[in-house]
Image: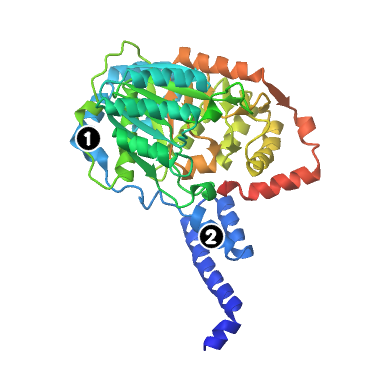
Amino acid sequence: MLDYLTNHTWVIAIVINYLLALTAIITILLKNVDPTKTLSYIMVLVFVPFFGLFVYYMFGQEYRKTKLFNRKDISNRSVIKSVGKNLRIKEQDFDELNAVLDEKIKLVKLLKASEKSPLTLRNDIDILVNGKIKFERLFQDLKDAKNFIHIEYYVIKDDKIGTQFLDILCAKAKDGLEVKMTYDDVGSCISSKMKRKINESGIEHRAFMPVWFSSLTGKSNYRNHRKIAIIDGEIGYVGGINISDSYVNYEDSSTYWRDTHLRIYGEAVKVLQFHFLTTWDFVTEEEIEIKKIYFPEIECDQEIPVQIAASGPDTDWANIMEAILTAINNAEEYIYLTTPYFIPNDQIVTALQIAARVGLDVRLIIPKESDSWVAQRATASYLEPLLEAGVKVYLYKRGFIHAKTMVVDDIFGTIGTCNMDNRSFNINFEINALIYHNEKCKKLKSIFLEDLEDCETLKYEYWKERSKYCKLQESLSRLWAPLL
C-alpha cells in the first residue's frame, strides 16, 4: 500500500486537487455571484491545479453574508443607541434637504435605512489637498487633543513622517490621554524598536488580521484599507492619505504623490467613531468599554450635510459602490471621477456609458503610470468602450494620483478610501464621506479641473489603434480583474 502511494503520489494529488476544486466550483455556482467573477474562478480552478485552489481560498471566499467579522454587535450598546437617536435629523430639516437635492435624495435614503450611516447636518469640513497640508492640520489637532485619540490606518510606517506621527501619539499617551491605534498588518511596517516605544508610552495598539510574513503576502484578502483619525470625538479625518513618506512629496521624493483627504468637525465624527469602535471590537479579545466621552456634544454653527458610508465583509451591502452607482444614475449635468485603480464592475461601466451617451459631461482621471503593471493593463481594457460612449478619460502625468474622489452636479461629492475596483467594492474594509453641499462640491470640482492641467487627454481614435499585443496583455490582465 505504501509503495502504491509512493509510486502514484502525483496522480493522487491531482485527484484530491480536482475533488476540492469541484467542491469549490459547486459552492461558487450556488452563490449566484457576478458571472465574470464566477468564470474567472472556475477557469483558475480547472486550468491551474493547486495554485487555483490557493487563489480561491485566499481571494474567493465571500464573508459578507456569513458575518465572520461580526464577533459582537456593538450597535446594540445603550450609548451607541442613544447617539444614533440624537443624530436623527428632524423631518423639517429632511424636507428642506429634499428640496435642495431633488432626485439625489435617493442617495440619502439608500444609506439612511442603515443605522450605521445616518445623515448628519451640523458639520464643518475642509478638503485637504496632498499630504503636506493634511499632516500639518492633523499633527496640530493631535497636539491639541485633551481627552483621547483614536487611530485606524491601512499604512503606518515609522519613516520620517511616521516617526513624527508616532512620537506625538506617544507624548500624548504619556500625558495621560487615552490613545488607541489599529493598523493593517499587511499595509503597515513598524519596527520592533518603535513598537517598544509605543508600548512604553501606554498606547493601546493592535494589528488588523496579523499575518506571519506581511512583506510576502501582497494583497492578502480582507485588509483594512480605512484611514481614520478621531480627536476628542469632535474632529475626524478620512481620505486617501496614509501615514508614510510616500504621501508627503519631500524634495528628494522619487514620485510626486497627488492625494485628497477630508477634515471634519461636527456630528459626522460620531459615525466615524462608531466604525472605529467596530474595528477595535474586532481586533481586541476583551469586552470593550464604550464611554460617553467618545460621543461629546458638539457645538458647530455650520450646516454641511455629511453621511459616512462604510463597506466591507462586516456590512450587509456594498454601501459605497451602491452610493456611487446611485449618484451616477441620478446625475443631470456632470460626473467627475478620480481614482488610482479603475477596474469597475459591469453596473458602473454601463451607468457611465449611459450617462455619457445621453449628453452628460462624464470625466475620469486615472494615473498615466500605475504602481501595478497588472492593474494598469486591466484598467486599460475598460477604457475603449467608455471612450466610444463619450466618456472623457484623462491620464495624470505629473506623478501618481491616489485620490479617490467623485463630484456630481455641484451638489454631491465623496472623498474616502474606496477605489473603483472589485477589491474596494467587495473585499477590503473601506470608508467614504458623502457630502451634500453646493460650496464644498464646487471646491471639489475646482480641484478636479486643476488636476486636468497635469493630465493628457486619451483620444478614442488613438486608443482603438493600439497594437494587438497591447490588447492581448489587457485581456489577460482583465481575467484577473475580479481578483485584483
Task: In the rendered view, tell whether residue 155 sits above or below residue 133.
Answer: below
Residue topped by disc 1: 290
Which kind of residue does numbered mark 2 sit on? Phe
Q: Is residue 291 left or right of residue 402?
A: left
Q: Is residue 125 above or below residue 374?
A: above
Q: Viewer-proximal residue, 255 or 72?
A: 255
Q: Please indicate whether residue 402 sits to the left or right of residue 430 in the image.
A: right
Kindly identify the amino acid type of the residue bearing the numbered disc 1.
Ile
Which residue is at 58% across, 19% downward?
448
Is residue 108 left or right of 58 when viewed as pictured?
A: left
Name the residue rendered at 58%, 73% in the picture. 14
Q: Position of residue 312 (x, y in %)?
A: 42, 42
Q: Position of residue 121 (x, y in %)?
A: 33, 19
Which is nearer the eye, 476 or 329?
Answer: 476
Quadrant of res 474 = top right
Report the residue at 63% width, 28% height from top: 255
Furthest-top residue in view?
Answer: 301
Q: Residue at x 47, y 25 (%)?
A: 414
Q: Is residue 315 visible?
A: no
Q: Residue furthest left?
A: 78
Please tell me whether mark 2 sits on a helix, a strand or a loop: helix
CA–CA distance in space, label 1 to label 2:
39 Å
Element on which disc 1 rests:
loop
> Visible in this render: residue 254?
yes
In the image, 38 versus 109, the foreground residue is 38
Instruction: Of the two numbered discs 1 and 2 on the same chain, state the one appearing first in sequence.
Output: 2
Callout 1 environment at 10 Å: few (<14), some (14 to 19), or many (20+)?
Answer: some
The residue that label 2 is drawn on is 54
Circle number at residue 187 = none
* Residue 103 image offset from top left, x and y in percent: 45, 24
Q: Horizontal and vertical percent for residue 355?
A: 60, 28
Quadrant in the picture for residue 177: top left
